[in-house]
Image: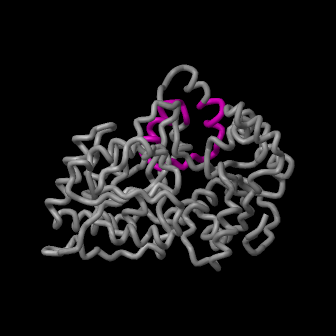
Amino acid sequence: MRVVLINNYDLLDILDALKQEKGDAPAQHLWGYLPLNNQRMSVEILPFQKYTYLKKISKKLKIFGDLDQQLRLLMQHKRYDVIYSAHHLTTLLLSFLRLVGLFSKPIVAIAYQAPQEKTFFWKLFTKVFIAGNDKILCLSESLRQDLEEFGVSKQKLELIEWGTDLKFYEFGAPSNRSPGSKAQPFILSPGKTYRDYPTLIEAFQSVDCKLIICGAGATHLDTSSEPLPTNVTLIEDMIHWKKLIKLYQRAYAVAIPLENSANKFKNAIGLTALTEAMATGNAIVMTRNDYVGIDLEKEGIGLWVDPNDVNGWHNAMTYLLEHPEITREMGRRSRRLAESRFNLETFSSKLANYLWQTCSGNQPSQLVRHKPAFRR
């Protein structure tokens, strides 16, 4: 089976970086590309950009998705048996054409976003531009339910859980979680997308613990007018993934503060940091977000905090610091959950099954085996 993979960011750049590390690096942000090539498939990544003017049009007319990639796929779709879209909003035009019978190839799409409100406009948008996908694999049950309420057929919706390339994330409880340890504990807060660091920093003004914020150079914190509290350290530069994993492994717990964004779409914001924290065996405190697909408190791996809740953050962090045994057990559960469900291997295996199921009713093209293309 020949598969083409399309996404909303440049996967070939990630593949190039992986090649530079001789393949010895986490590959979860390739969305199963490498494991799928070992599942009797030939998977090709579509280059992210060719026609700059189409990219510019797409940014203004977002209702059609990425026109640059989709129009190229329309010209060469006969080369493939199935379209794998790792971001369902990128292939909106193809989904529409599939819906009205003008596109013959099946589409399997990953979804982690949905409109905030179930208004007539968004229901119509969903039925016209999203419902044409043959399979929509949702990263959370909340999203799956929302898309069904928007009018997508239940038979097209499936739940799939995403996670880290687990072999690169070793579990080892740091000494600062051990009883009687004299090591100074610290809380790690990673990530840059829609982060509410001001609320977290305000909470830590009265928390007796060090906080390390690692925002990959994009925290948008103005420290010139108001200095950070003495117990807060900001790592502004992008750091190597191995150094970030070591920070996870040494952390007492992980904090993921999210903005209460009122934009048009709900989103699985914080999922990457959450799954990395789980893989390294951390207890997690996070702003409530049903779209990440993991209930921290139900699974016993952490605590939820309401949006913009300074007292909530203070109380949650204080609770973990005062209960190290509970914190350690949360971390152990986190790792077990990552091993059993939220990992790249499990995700890729389920994804492969859905791709085969979706393609089973279509006449396959001639399969040509090839090595993964590490260059554009």
Give the colour scheme of this rendering: one colour
**Which residue is more in the foreground, 344 or 152?**
344
Asked which quadrant contains residue 41, the reply is: bottom right
Q: Is residue 300 above or below residue 169?
A: above
Q: Determine the residue positioned at 63% across, 41% down.
A: 89
Residue closest to the far right: 75
The residue stretch that appears in magenta: 126-152
Q: Determine the residue positioned at 29% across, 39% down.
A: 306
Q: Is residue 174 left or right of residue 347?
A: left
- State yes or no: residue 212 in magenta: no
User: Residue 211's spot in the image, x, y percent?
Assistant: 32, 58
User: Residue 320's spot in the image, x, y percent?
Assistant: 20, 58
User: Residue 161's spot in the image, x, y percent?
Assistant: 46, 56
Task: Tell me, yes or no, if residue 336 can be seen here.
Answer: no
**Which residue is more in the foreground, 319 or 158?**
319
Asked which quadrant contains residue 170, the reply is: bottom left
Q: Is residue 128 above or below residue 67?
A: above
Asked which quadrant contains residue 142, the reply is: top left
